[in-house]
Image (cartoon, grey):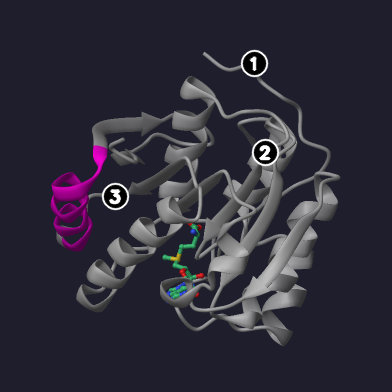
Amino acid sequence: MPRLEPVPEAHIDFAYGIYFLDQRHRLIRALKKRYKPSIHGHKTWGSSFLLMDYLTHYGLRRGAGLMELGCGWGGVSVFCAHRFRSRVTGVDLDPAVFPYVDVLAELNEVTVRHLQADFTNLPRSELVDQCYLVGSDICFWDSLVKPLGQLVARSFEAGVERVVIADPGRPTFYEFCDLMAEDHKVDLQAWYSIEPNRFEGEVIDIRPRS
Ligand SMILES: C[S@@+](CC[C@H](N)C(=O)[O-])C[C@H]1O[C@@H](n2cnc3c(N)ncnc32)[C@H](O)[C@@H]1O
């Protein structure tokens, strides 16, 4: 079981080595008055803790380039920057998420570069610097399945080594997994996280075949 970490004030959680602010924290309440994410990026989703747990178990090369697709509040970005010293870029279509990323990054004394972009349309110039692409709960619409698959193929062509995506188990995610298994080396596992609460879902770890 994880060590019980005393938190410095109310409405702060500690999970996977990182401090998080919950919805009732005064900073989050202040941000919510000014910035209103509109594509579901309005909280840290459970799948992000799933991904943190999975990456804690399997690890990442220290100091490597990492892009978080659909980063939302950037929980996974901050975790990777802290745990693996990853050089992190958080990508999101919705600019309203980045103030939340900044607060979380500041709180944990790490740096996360922002990229406001559609992850289905990322240029090769952004992919060539990355060793890893990661994402949590980013395959939630039918319209995302194929474009996300095409991104994985393009990222491997650009030199990305691994793509790791966590999901609560949506039908669209399983469609994406089937698509990935056609062309790439795929490891799909049921997984659970225990910090800050128990959460269950799936993680797909995708590598190029050759
Ligand atoms: C369900 S939230 C998950 C956020 C975060 N990954 C987490 O687990 O807490 C989905 C995120 O993906 C972003 N998003 C959706 N479609 C996108 C796209 N085509 N390109 C970039 N970001 C996108 C949304 O703005 C939102 O922040």
- Distance from Cα at disc 1 to Cα at disc 3: 26 Å
Q: Position of residue 93 (x, y in %)?
A: 53, 79
Helix, strand or loop for the magenta stretch, by majority: helix
Residue where numbered disc 2 is placed: 64
Q: Secondary structure at mark 3?
A: loop
| In this rendering, the label closer to the viewer, 1 or 2 | 2
In magenta stretch: residue 46:
no
Query: Which label's residue is closer to the chain start, 3 or 2?
Result: 2
Residue where numbered disc 3 is placed: 168
| Label ID, residue 55 | none
Query: Which label's residue is closer to the chain start, 1 or 3?
Result: 1
* Local crowd size for mark 1, using a 10 Å CA cut-off: few (<14), some (14–19), many (≥20): few
Which stretch appears magenta? 172-185
In depth, the one of 171 and 204 nearer the eye is 204
The answer to whether marks 1 and 3 mark residues whose Cβ atoms lie closer than 8 Å is no
Residue, x 50% and y 50% (percent of image)?
Answer: 133
* Mark 3 Cβ and ligand 1 under 8 Å apart: no
Residue 26 visible in the picture? no
Residue where numbered disc 1 is placed: 3
